Image: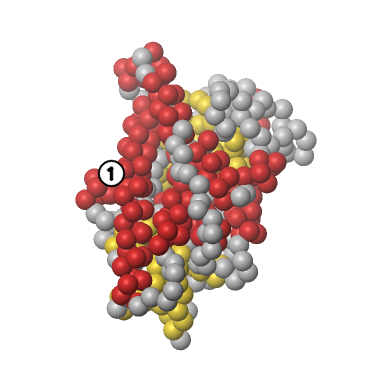
Amino acid sequence: METIQDIVIVGGGIAGLSLALALHRVGLRALVLESYDTLRVTGAAFVTWTNAWKALDALGVAHSLRQHHTRLSGGDHEVRCVKRKVLLETLAKELPSNTIRFSSKVVSIEISGFFKLLHLADGSILKTKVLIGCDGVNSVVARFLGFKKPSFTNRLAIRGCVDFEENHGFDSKFLQFMGNGRRYGILPCDATSIYWFFTWSPLHEEDEEIKENPTKLKEFVLNNLGKVQDKIKNVIENTKVEDIICSPLRIRPPWEIIWKDITKDNICITGDALHPMTPDLGQGACSALEDSIVLARHLADGFLKGSEMRDEVEYEKIESCLRKYAKERKWRGIDLITTGYFVGSMQQTSWKFIRFLRDKVFATFLAGLLLKKADFDCGQLNNT
C-alpha cells in the first residue's frame, strides 16, 4: 500500500523530533519514521550550550526544560546538562498527534519522478515530496546520497546517569579529569541527578570485549579513575548497570562533506546523519538543534506557499530551499567536526610533550574555542 506525505523525517531522535516541531511551528506538517517501537531515550544526558538554548527558545520548549535542569556556574554562557529522556518527551508532547510513526524502519529509497518512495520493513511504501534524514551515524538517507559510514576515531565513550534519593552534594560545576590517554567528567543535571562520561582509546582486546557488558564497563571505569574523591567514585558505584552505555566515537571526515552534496533534489540530512563528531566540544546535540531551526526556516520560505502549484514548480522550490539550507549549514558542520577532533586529541593525548603544551600553552586557547563555538546564533523561526 502506497501513501503520500508532504515531508517525511527518518529518525525520531533529537534531530528528528526538533525538526518536526520546528516545521510544526512554521505551519508545516511532517511525518517522523522511528524504527524503534517507542522513543529512543537511551543516551543518558548531554551538555546544552548557549547556542542550543537559543534553538530551544525558538522551538518554544526552553522554559520548561530550564525548570528541570540546573544551570552550571562559571562565565556568562548558559550551560546545562539536559537529560535526553526529558528533552525527547518534551518535544514529542508539543507535536500534533500521529506525527511519530513507530516501528517504521526504512530499508530502501527509490526515485519516482518528483517524489521519493520509501520502502519500509513492514512492506508498506511512503511517497514523499521532501525526505529528510535524521537517522544518525548509520543513516540510510546519507548512504543514498553517497556518503560512507562515519570513520571510527579509535576512541570509545562510556556514559551513565544516576538518580540519588537526596541531594547529591555536588556544586553546579562541570568537573573534568584528564590523564594517561583518558578523559572523564561529572555534570549535575539537577539537585538529585548526575551525568558522567568516560572516554578512552582501547589498547587491548579486553578493552574491546567489555563494550557489550555494562557490569564490566562499570568496573572498568572504577578501576581507571585514578586518585579522586570518594564522592566521585560513589557516582559511578551508584549508577545502575542498565543506565550505562558504551559507544564508539565516530566522525564524518570533513573533506567528505566538502566534496559531496548534503542535499540532492528533494532530499537532505541533518544532525548526526550529516555531521557526526566527537563529544569534546559538547556540540553534537546542540548543532542538531541548530539544524532544525535553519532547515525549517528555509522550507517555510518557499514550501507550498501561495496557490496550488504544478509538481515541477513545487519540486524546484523545494530543491532551492534545501540548497540554501545546505549552504548555511555545511561549513558549520565542518568547523565543529574539525575543532572537536583537534580538541579531543589534545585533551586525551598520552604524549608528555603534547600534554605539556596543552596544560601550559594551549589551555586558555582550548577553553576559548569551546566558548566561541557556543556563541553561534541559529536565528528565529519565521512563524506563520
Taking depth in this image into account, of 157 and 285 the one nearest to the observer is: 285
- Residue at position x 36%, y 65% from top? 318
- Residue at position x 54%, y 55% from top? 383
Q: Residues within 10 Å of mark 1 (few under 14, many from 20)?
A: some
Point out the residue furthest to the front here.
307
What is the three-letter code of the residue carrying label 1?
A: Pro
Which residue corresponds to mark 1?
Answer: 254
- Residue at position x 52%, y 67% from top? 29
Residue 152 x, y percent position in the rendering: 33, 46
Q: Give the quadrant of residue 2.
A: bottom left
Q: Is residue 172 left or right of residue 23?
A: right
Q: Is residue 127 visible?
A: yes
Q: Give the quadrant of residue 162.
A: top right
- Residue at position x 29%, y 78% from top? 113
| 37 lies above or below 93 | below
Q: Is residue 129 left or right of residue 37?
A: left
Taking depth in this image into account, of 359 and 135 the one nearest to the observer is: 135
Taking depth in this image into account, of 100 and 246 the one nearest to the observer is: 100
